Amino acid sequence: MTPVRPLRRRLAGPQNRNLWFWAFVGPFLAGLIVFVYVPIGWSVYLSFFESYNTVSPTKFVGFGNYADLFRDDAFTSSLRTFLLFALFIVPVTFAASLLLAVLVNRARWGKAFFRSVYFVPTACSYVVAALVWKLSIFSGVRFGVANQLLGNVGQSPIAWLSVTHPPWYWLVIVTLRLWLQVGFYMILFLAGLQRIAPALYEAAAVDGARPGWQTFRYITFPQLRGTSAAVLALLLINAFQAFDEFYNLLSSSSGYPPYARPPLVYLYYVALGQQQDLGHGSAGAVILAGIIAIFTLLQGRFVGFGEESARDRRKARRAAGAAA
Amino acid sequence: MTAIRRGRVERFGSVLRYVLLIAGAVLFLTPFYLLVRNALSSDADITSPHWKPLPSHLRWSNLRQLFDDESVPMWHSLVNSLVVAVSQTAGTIVLAALAGYGLARIPFRYANVVFGAVVATLLIPASVTFVPSFIVVSSLGWLNTLRGLIVPGVFQAFACFLFRQYFLGFPTEIEDAARIDGLGYWGTFWRIVVPNSKAILAAVGTLTFIGSWNAFLWPLIIAQDPDSWTVQLSLSTFITAQTINLHELFAAALVSILPLVVVFLFLQRFIVQGVERTGING
């Protein structure tokens, strides 16, 4: 018969392990609760109320805020803006970062130099990039760099950010993000390329595969499947959160134009604009959080949160390489 | 015959590869070049219809003028950015590494539940929940304070997740030896594990610092008062309101990215190694 241990001892666990666990994990978890769980809960609560300029509302409106949002053209058009943006930026960044990774990986000299050149824009802020894009490269007046180049071939200048037919602003927005983020994804692809067992290429050469497109098509690209899925998912999730470059390129002292408003820009003006409409703002946040949670779950399905599986696969591959 | 042809094809391929690499490098460096060029030009040189690759003369005085200009809170916002980025980086690393170690190494019956609660927050990135976070921070009375800018960003579930994965792969033999020598969890962590994890600490630290220094949406919401502006907010206000000279604006942008680019060039290898080693993907 075991003696009943005092509660204090039981809570502390053998060798005070439970206490130590909470000493290590407690502060982090507490912060997560206060700054992630509480806000989300509070927001779900507010989304059912009419709440202008207040965080303790009284007028319950049920799903009214949600219904309003889906009836609001500006909200649905912000989702369309995101889709269009993703349609441009995701494939272009994917292809460009993969191309750069392959080029850098096979470079015989200057490898570290080229990698640094493509990677360093990662350190630049969207605000600074927007400044260079808006006031220098794609400045709408004649002295803008792009318009100078057009002028050299006899074209008239284009007001890049303020014409909507054709929507030249997409060129500005997409090239900016491409420049800023392509290096990071190139690094992910480079890591993926380095994990491909050289034995595979040797085997392919023995089988008569020509270096270049054939090897890329049948060895490199299939071997990068995991990396590719991760990159695609990250690109999509990041595109959904686009805010900085849109805001800094397009807003001016007279406000934000009615076009090119991605979801977060829309939400910003609803919740923190003139009216501080926190009811609709919260409902919008809940909808967007739901959408992005679905994206992320899909990503988890493709990529797997667990590192174990990836490590096992790598181990298996290494074993196969050793055997071959 | 085929060997000769293959050699020629390969040489052609290698030339083509370098042409592409160099063309790409020129394109990628152009924005930096434009930034430096305009920062050292006079306004007349920037807006001249006859664009020249270099201004008529390099005006280093632009930089001094920027810091002398009373109407531009450059010093103040640089200091704010530095305080925010340094404390956010330190806080993130300490909290996430501790939690990651606890989750990886200290046996606790409900550790999986706690880990689940941490991972679940990865489903929703912080930028999507800025409205709810704004509500909490404003009811704490933290609007327009550095606290409000720093504290909510310190609890990074992804950093915790990375550390846990890393510590799971840490050789237990070393920790066991430390345990036998009489170190507890606390001592083992600080004296054995941390000194042997410099690469991942540097990788997470660099990325956190960059993210924090460059953050825009969160400061835009929290720091409405110019006294609490970070450097990104000052720059953004100048861009949208266009209240200062172009050359000062470009000089300010240059000053804001210079320290970061220099630090980044030295520390990027830790990020590269970190990506290679932890392998965020299979």
Image (cartoon, grey):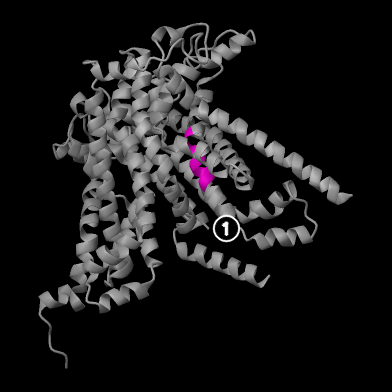
Instruction: Work out whether residue A317 or residue B117 is closer to the camera in this orientation and state it.
Output: A317
The percent coordinates of residue B140 (x first, y second) are 14, 40
B262 versus B1 height, above or below: above
Q: Can residue A46 be seen in this view?
A: no
Q: Quadrant of residue A99?
A: top right
Residue at (48% x, 28% y) in the render: A176
Q: Is residue A284 left or right of residue A15?
A: right
Instruction: Work out whether residue B243 or residue B268 is closer to the camera in this orientation and state it.
Output: B268
Q: Quadrant of residue B266?
A: top left
The percent coordinates of residue B146 (x first, y second) are 19, 36
A141 versus B193 height, above or below: above
Instruction: Work out whether residue A107 or residue B28 is closer to the camera in this orientation and state it.
Output: A107
A16 versus A222 height, above or below: below
Q: Quadrant of residue A125?
A: top left
Q: How many marks?
A: 1
Q: Is residue A201 left or right of residue A41?
A: right
User: Tag 1: residue type?
Assistant: Arg
Residue tagged 1: A195
A220 versus A313 height, above or below: above
Residue at (19% x, 63% y) in the render: A23
Instruction: Work out whether residue A227 or residue A40 is closer to the camera in this orientation and state it.
Output: A227
The percent coordinates of residue A267 (x first, y second) are 34, 31
Whether residue B273 appears in magenta in the rendering, the answer is no
Name the element at disc 1.
loop
**What residue occupies the far bottom of the structure in this picture?**
A1
Magenta span dominant secondary structure: helix
Q: Give the range drawn in magenta.
A: A180-187
Residue at (55% x, 16% y) in the render: A146
Residue at (44% x, 62% y) in the render: A306
